[in-house]
């Protein structure tokens, strides 16, 4: 009866968590591969992660001039901002990142700074942000 059903529900939950973990790993590999490919073809555009220095929502966008872009976003922000990281990449990478973090989306290109999102941003920083 109930004990058997509880065991099955727990197994289903664990299998579901494993599927989610596999999916997240696949997405992570995909965005890192897109950045690698952009780097190899000397893509002039960069995908960036920008956020308030004190923490808060993260903007994920693309630009060919990161300093100018940061200055433009800063002009419309009441909080001091900083570049968390950037990587070579065009709209394909930006779109993939937006899809990857769809559950963290707050508004437009602004996302909740989840551990998952900040972890990917840190990985980009380690590889590409000088």
Image (cartoon, rainbow, N blue to C red):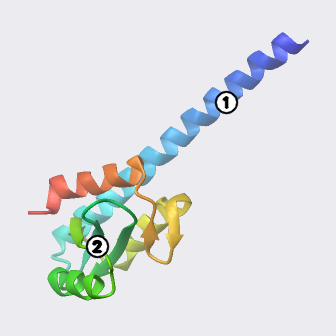
Q: Vertical placement of 69 versus 21: above or below? A: below
In the image, residue 48 lies at what x, y percent? 27, 71
In the image, residue 83 lies at what x, y percent? 21, 68
Residue occupying image coordinates x 32% and y 49%: 119
Is any atom of residue 44 visible in this view?
no
In front: 124, or 89? 124
Q: Which mark is residue 47?
A: 2
Could you classify mark 1 by the number of other residues whose Cα lies within 10 Å: few (under 14), some (14-19), or many (20 or more)?
Answer: few
Is any atom of residue 58 visible in this view?
yes
User: How far is the residue under mark 1 from the one under mark 2?
Assistant: 35 Å
Q: Vertical placement of 2 versus 28: above or below? A: above
Task: Report which quarter residue 73 is drawn in.
Answer: bottom left
Quadrant where the N terminus sits is top right
Pointer 1 residue: 13
Q: Vertical placement of 59 versus 10: above or below? A: below
Who comes first in sequence, dot 1 or dot 2? Answer: 1
């Amino acid at each position: 009866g109930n004990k058997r059903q509880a065991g099955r529900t727990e197994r289903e939950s664990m299998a579901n968590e494993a599927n989610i973990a596999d999916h997240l790993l696949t997405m992570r590999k995909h965005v890192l591969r897109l950045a690698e490919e952009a780097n190899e073809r000397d893509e002039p555009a960069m995908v960036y992660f920008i956020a308030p220095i004190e923490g808060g929502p993260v903007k994920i966008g693309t630009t060919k001039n990161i300093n100018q872009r940061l200055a433009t976003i800063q002009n419309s922000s009441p909080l001091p901002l900083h570049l968390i990281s950037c990587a070579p990449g065009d709209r394909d990478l930006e779109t993939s990142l937006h899809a990857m973090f769809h559950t963290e989306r707050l508004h437009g290109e602004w996302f909740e700074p989840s551990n998952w999102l900040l972890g990917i941003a840190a990985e980009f920083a380690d590889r590409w942000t000088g």
